[in-house]
Image (tube, rainbow, N blue to C red):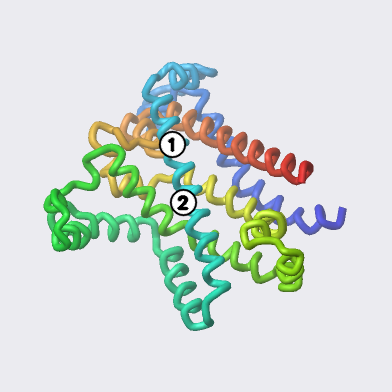
Amino acid sequence: MAALLYLAPAALLLIGMMGYPLYQLVQISLYEYGQAQASGGAPVVFLGAENYLTLLGDGQFWTILVQTCVFAAVCVVGSLAVGIALAVLATRISPLPRLLLFLAAIGAWATPAMAGSTVWLFLFDQDFGLVNEVLTGVGIDGAAGFSWTYDKFVAFGLVAAEVIWCSFPFVLVTTYAGLTGIPGEVVEAAALDGASAWRTARTVLLPMLRPVLVIATIQSIIWDFKIFTQIYVMTNGGGVAGQNMVLNVYAYQSAFAGSNYGLGSAIGVVMTVLLILITLAYLRTQRKDEANA
C-alpha cells in the first residue's frame, strides 16, 4: 500500500498528460475527419469502426506492420547486445578509458534524432560521404558512388545502425549500474565452486540483472517500435516508392499528406494497442521464467 501511495503522484501526472490525448486519438479515429472538417468547412461524420476496417483491409498496412516489427526487433536486439557488451567491458577496464567510453556513449545518447540522422546521412552520402571514400581507398569494388538508401534492406540496415548508435547508451548505463551493484563475493563464491565464466554469467549474474534488463528491454521496444525521425530523414519520407515505411511514418503520411486524420488516428490507436500487448507478453514471459528458475 505504501508503494502505491508513493507512485500515486506520478500516476496522476501521467494520466493527466496522456489520458486526454489518447482519448482524442481514439475519438478522431471514429470519425471522418480530414482537412475540410478540421477547418470547419464540412461536418464531422461518425464512421464507427470504418477507419479500422479500411486499415485492416489494406494490404500495404500489413506489409508495413511486418516491416515495423522486424525493424524494431533488430534495433532492440542490437541495442541490448551492444549495450550489455560495453557494460561488461566497462567493468573490466581502468577508470580513464571507462570515463571516455561513458562520455562517448552519453554524447551519442544526447544527440537529437534529427541532428544524428543528418550526420549519418552525410557520412554515408553517395557522392561526398566519408564512408564511401574510405571503402574506395581500401580497394573495395563498387564503393564509389554506392547509394546506401536506394536498396530497401540496405536502407533499413543503415537506419537500424543509427538507431542502435543512439539507443545503446541507455542499455549500457542501466546494465553497468546493475553489474556494479552485484556483490563481488557472489562471483567469487561461484568461481570457488568451480563454475565457468559462462555458467556464472547465466546462472548468477543474469538472474540478478533481470530487473534492469527488463526495464531496458521494455524501453527499447517502445522507442524502436515508434521510430519516426530516423526513417523519415534518412530515407526521405519512407524510401523509394515507400519501401522503407514504418507505422509511424505511415500514420503521418495518411494523416497529413493524405489529409485523412481519422485514418491516421486509427493507425496510432493500433500502434498503442500493439505496444501494450507486446509489453504485457514480454512481462508475462519474464514472470514465467522467474517462476521456473
Q: Within 10 angstroms of label 1, few (less than 14), some, or many (20 or more) residues?
A: many
- Mark 2, residue position: 78
Q: Is residue 277 above or below residue 30?
A: below
* Residue 187 located left or right of residue 101: right
* Residue 42 located left or right of residue 145: right
Element carrying mark 1 = helix
Taking depth in this image into account, of 293 and 164 the one nearest to the observer is 293
Image spot of residue 10 (x, y percent): 70, 55
Q: Within 10 angstroms of label 2, few (less than 14), some, or many (20 or more) residues?
A: some
Quadrant of res 231: top left
**Which residue sits at x=49%, y=78%?**
99
- Mark 1, residue position: 68
Q: Amino acid at mark 1?
A: Thr
**Which residue sits at x=34%, y=59%?**
116
* Residue 269 located left or right of residue 292: left
Q: Amino acid at mark 2?
A: Gly
Q: Is residue 104 above or below residue 278?
A: below
Taking depth in this image into account, of 4 and 289 the one nearest to the observer is 289
Closest to the camera, between mark 2 and mark 1, is: 2
Inter-mark Cα distance, 2 to 1: 15 Å
Image spot of residue 285 (x, y percent): 68, 39
Residue 40 seen in this snapshot: no
Label tally? 2
Taking depth in this image into account, of 90 and 45 the one nearest to the observer is 90
Query: Going from the N terminus, do you reach mark 2 or mark 1 first?
Result: 1
Q: Mark 2–mark 1 contact, CB under 8 Å?
A: no
Quadrant of res 245: top left
Image spot of residue 281 (x, y percent): 65, 36
**Which residue sits at x=74%, y=43%?**
287
Element carrying mark 2 = helix
Residue 50 seen in this snapshot: yes
